[in-house]
Image (tube, rainbow, N blue to C red):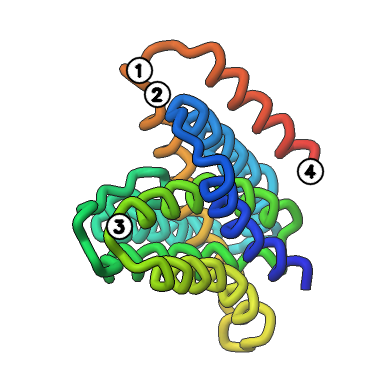
């Protein structure tokens, strides 16, 4: 039950931070994104990867599923415009939720819920990833002309997608039979998202000691979990 509550809470924590503190410092947000990207990448490498290759006699096929996950995330980002790693470009005059953006984010959130039940540590990675994304999504939605009740409903549905993925992975036998394949797919998604966050948030490709320390801290924290 904690898995469901915490994954939902991460979205509302991000939204509440925006509503209460109204953060405007883009540098701090980029550092938070860098931390989340490094943390998610480290958790994927430390926890998820060993799981899918453990006692695996079809390692190459697993690698194919990882590549499919990377490519799938690339397709999702074509429609979401990179919202999964902090890039949301909405017309501020819009009065409707962009359907393709919402569907893409929903698929991404649903899939990332699948490994939570089976792999220790990944829940923390998803929470750390979701908070800054929820902050960015909330900020952009509030800056449009979309009615506030619609914004609230959108955030609630978004928050429910990850626990829905966890629920499906726990209780549907058909899905459990493809545990390694689905997890490999999710690994590909996480690898793409986390590395994109790390590389794209590097302004001008300049060496940034603060960002480096944040990445090291995230990696070390992930290792301890």
- Whether residue 181 is visible, yes or no, is no
In space, the residues marked 3 and 2 are separated at their CA atoms by: 21 Å
Q: Secondary structure at mark 4?
A: loop
Crowd band around label 3 with a 10 angstrom C-alpha radius: few (<14), some (14–19), many (20+):
many
Residue in the picture at 75% in, 56% down: 120
Residue 77 at x, y = what percent?
A: 31, 54
**Dots 2, 1 in contact, CB < 8 A:** yes
**Dots 3, 2 in contact, CB < 8 A:** no
Work out whether 81 lies above or below 113.
above
Residue in the picture at 72% in, 30% down: 220
Q: Secondary structure at mark 3?
A: helix
Image quadrant where residue 97 sits: bottom left
In space, the residues marked 3 and 4 are separated at their CA atoms by: 31 Å
**Dots 1, 4 in contact, CB < 8 A:** no
Residue 80 is labelled as: 3
In space, the residues marked 1 and 4 are separated at their CA atoms by: 30 Å
Q: How many marks?
A: 4
Q: Mark 2 sits on what residue?
A: 202
**Which mark sits nearer the N-terminus, 2 or 4?**
2
Residue in the picture at 21% in, 61% down: 94
Q: Secondary structure at mark 2?
A: loop
**Which mark sits nearer the N-terminus, 3 or 2?**
3
Residue 104 at x, y = what percent?
A: 35, 65
Residue 205 is labelled as: 1
Front: mark 3 or 4: 3
């Amino acid at each position: 039950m904690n898995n469901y509550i915490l994954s939902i809470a991460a979205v509302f924590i991000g939204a509440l931070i925006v509503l209460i503190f109204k953060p405007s410092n883009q540098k701090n947000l980029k550092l938070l994104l860098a931390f989340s990207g490094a943390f998610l990448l480290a958790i994927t490498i430390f926890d998820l990867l060993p799981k899918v290759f453990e006692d695996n006699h079809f390692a190459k096929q697993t690698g194919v599923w990882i590549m499919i996950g990377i490519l799938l995330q690339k397709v999702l980002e074509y429609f979401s415009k990179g919202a999964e790693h902090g890039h949301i470009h909405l017309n501020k005059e819009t009065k409707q939720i962009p359907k393709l953006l919402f569907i893409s984010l929903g698929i991404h959130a649903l899939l990332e819920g699948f490994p939570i039940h089976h792999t220790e540590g990944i829940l923390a990675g998803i929470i750390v990833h979701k908070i800054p994304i929820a902050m960015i999504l909330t900020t952009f939605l509030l800056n449009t002309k979309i009615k506030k009740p619609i914004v609230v409903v959108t955030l609630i549905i978004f928050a429910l997608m990850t626990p829905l993925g966890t629920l499906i992975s726990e209780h549907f036998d058909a899905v459990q039979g493809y545990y390694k394949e689905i997890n490999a797919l999710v690994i590909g998604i996480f690898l793409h998202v986390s590395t994109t966050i790390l590389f794209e948030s590097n302004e001008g490709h300049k060496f940034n000691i603060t960002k480096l320390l944040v990445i090291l801290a995230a990696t070390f924290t992930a290792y301890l979990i």
